[in-house]
Image (cartoon, helix red, strand yellow):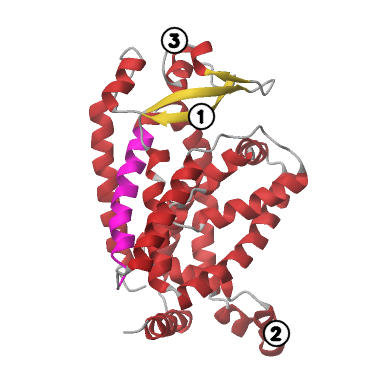
Amino acid sequence: MSKKQHFTANYKKLKSLQYMQRRFIDYLIISFKGIAMGAADAVPGVSGGTIAFISGIYEELIFSISNVNLSLFKTLFTKGIKAFWKQANGNFLTALLLGIIVSFVSFMRLAKYLLEHHPVLIWSFFFGLIVASIYFVGKQITKWNLAVIVSLIIGACIAFYITTLPALATNNNPWFLFLAGAIAICAMILPGISGSFILIILGAYKTLSDALHDFDIKKIIIFATGALIGLLSFSRVLKWLFKHYHNITLALLTGFIFGSLNKVWPWKRTVSVMVDETGEILPFSQVSNLGTLSVFQKQTNEFDTYKTVLEESVYAFNYSEINDYIYPQTMPAIALMILGFLTIFILEKLGSKKL
């Protein structure tokens, strides 16, 4: 089957989904997939796009978003709201977005607590989840050639490089928050690229987290507007790539997921930190004799004074050694890696159901 035939078959299948009769239980499952996507996007380093891909809704999501255009609103005025809703695949988008929003807002607080108090354990779970994701996304590639392999390598290199970038200082400028929303949402729908981690790099994660916590409507609306514009624009790019370069696009996305493993590796050594109050960047060795900021924070119960700027991956036994064998959690971490790995198989089973 040629690339054009493959895309045409997929496109017809996705178009038919807009008009098929889904049951309430089908939309409930879609909402649960949205909950999983929102929870993943709340954790810096994990992509909701990966969850969407594994659970079998990625291409329908991209096609549905890209269909939001002027012709859709023309349908609204000429044929009425029922035809508009059907053309927009409204039931699917509503069920999915409801799950994403509820999960993202609620899980962001839980994620903050887990990342502060049990970072090794939560990263271990997501590391196992992403390792399994590489296989399930990669197996969608129908034909391997040099261009596909090069795309895979390029995607892995780009994602790895992003994970090594230092975080910027917090920025509350409204235009910056708008731009951060547009950039982060593009990352959120790309498998392997974490929208939350992009927000950290840009210095907008704390601003958004505080806005959600304090219900700062102005900042939330500014961020959401940027995200909406970014989403509508970037979904068209992805739709075009899937149409013309299906296997190459899948290889690039698989590379993104592979490269992101550096970020979610559970055992880290902190290289430098930022003093939250002044913005001053210090070598972590000047702050503590321990090797990792999270261990130091848990020891001192002080989570807001310093923020990680640069960190590097180390082996599990090195992690225990540089932190004086405090909270090694090696065996529970390995168990959670396995659980994360198996979770993907469950999501893939759900994704294989005809909804």
| Quarter containing the C terminus | bottom left
* Kind of residue indicated by mark 1: Leu
> Helix, strand or loop at disc 2?
helix
State left or right for residue 231 relative to residue 56.
right
Label drawn at residue 270: none
The residue to which callout 3 is attached is 289
Determine whether 341 is above or below 318 in the image. Answer: below
Question: How many C-alpha atoms fall within 10 Å of the one at disc 2: few (<14), some, or many (≥20)?
Answer: few
Q: Earlier in the sequence, mark 3 or mark 1?
A: 3
* Residue in the foreground of this view, choosing between 110 and 207: 207
> Helix, strand or loop at disc 3?
loop
Of discs 2 and 1, which sits in the foreground? 1
Q: Quadrant of residue 206?
A: top right
* Residue in the foreground of this view, choosing between 174 and 267: 267
Could one spot residue 43 in this view of the protein? no
Determine whether 288 is above or below 235 in the image. Answer: above
| Quarter containing the N terminus | bottom left
Q: Is residue 124 magenta?
A: yes
Q: Looking at the image, which residue is at 35% across and 16% down?
A: 322
Q: Earlier in the sequence, mark 2 or mark 1?
A: 2
Q: Looking at the image, which residue is at 27% across and 47% down?
A: 341
**Would you say the magenta stretch is mainly helix, strand or loop?**
helix
The residue to which callout 2 is attached is 74
The residue to which callout 1 is attached is 310
Q: Looking at the image, which residue is at 41% across and 81% down?
A: 7
x and y, in percent, of residue 172 in the image: 73, 38
x and y, in percent, of residue 155 in the image: 43, 55
